[in-house]
Image: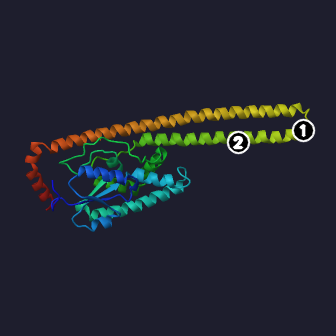
Amino acid sequence: MEMGADTPPIVLVAEDAQDLAEAVLARLHGIFPDRSVHVAETLGAAAADPEARIVLALTAPQEALATALAMAPGMPDGERVGEAALAAWCERAAGLLDEARALRERLWIVDARAMAEGLPQTLNPERPSRSRRTEPAVPPPPLVHLLVADRLIRSDARAARLAAELASLRSGPPAWRFDAAFADRVLEDWHATRTEIALLRRTVLLLQEAADEALARSAAIDATGAAQREARARLEERLARAEADRQQREGFLGAEILRLSALLADERRRLLDDLAAAQDEIARLRSSTSWRVTAPLRAVGRQLRRS
């Protein structure tokens, strides 16, 4: 189809998902091959063209907050840092929602990571994306930061409300989310693991200090001080056992964290595949004869609801 007045340009705004902007832009070119697609720095800049349809690419609230947490010193254990990051995210989300309401007639909000991975969107029902889902070059934040971010959002009424409102305005399939009970259990296990590792490291440090002290004392003792040498050997033996125990426990706990991460990743992939299948089914229904025949009735219904 030739470009014309009935094919307004597409303007992508990805200021909160800049790492994924290039992949999202490529997907938009594939979904809208007959339209001009370009990038604007902000919603305000995009709104300057009154004819343009604006695509606002956002990462899921958990990912946006987790990215901020990953860059903050003292995380993921710093409670005040987490509260500050959550407050900053809430202010940003509230501002975006205000701008989105003003542009709602020509604005699509999409999940940036879902678009980057090729998950079909409802931006163009007549020609949905058929590309396979791919792994983007930009990985998501660490799992533990995602879990912390998810708990922070769920525990704050304002953050939960803002996240829900953003989700209600988003085009395409719903964004992924953790099972709350499972996420809390994994996060509690992770904190317990960190505590145990810290205790083991402290024990090793104390034993090392004791061994160093014994070594310093033995250096000043006559070579015939067999008792001191025996004490030193015992301390070094205890140190070796403690170090071996620490390495064994860290290996086991690390493997458990990887296993839990894999379970979460598998579950997320399964949900995304289910959503993609449902989206394809919706596209098939919308392309059916009955959908086209009843289009005038739906248009009349929408007009009646607006009036």
Direction front: furthest residue: 2
Disc 2 secondary structure class: helix
Do tag 2 and tag 1 residues touch (Cβ < 8 Å)? no
Tell me what residue is drawn at x 15 percent, y 56 percent.
2
Q: Is residue 141 above or below residue 246?
A: below
Q: Nearer the viewer, mark 2 or mark 1?
A: 1
Q: Amino acid at mark 1?
A: Ile
Tell me what residue is drawn at x 40 percent, y 61 percent.
92
Task: Give residue 49's position: percent from left, percent from top.
Answer: 25, 67
Q: Is residue 180 left or right of residue 127?
A: right
Determine crowd level at label 1: few under 14, some 14-19, many 20+ residues with C-alpha closer than 10 A: few
Determine crowd level at label 2: few under 14, some 14-19, many 20+ residues with C-alpha closer than 10 A: some
Q: Amino acid at mark 2?
A: Leu
Q: Is residue 280 visible?
A: yes
Q: Is residue 29 left or right of residue 303?
A: right
The residue at which mark 1 appears reads as 221
State the residue in front, 19 or 249.
19
State the residue in front, 160 or 103.
103
Quadrant in the rendering for residue 210:
top right
Please report whichever mark, 2 or 1, sits nearer to the chain's N-terminal start.
2
The residue at which mark 2 appears reads as 205
The alpha-carbon separation of the residues under discs 2 and 1 comes to 24 Å
Task: Give residue 117's position: percent from left, percent from top.
Answer: 34, 45
Quadrant in the rendering for residue 217:
top right
Tell me what residue is drawn at x 62 percent, y 42 percent.
198
Disc 1 secondary structure class: loop
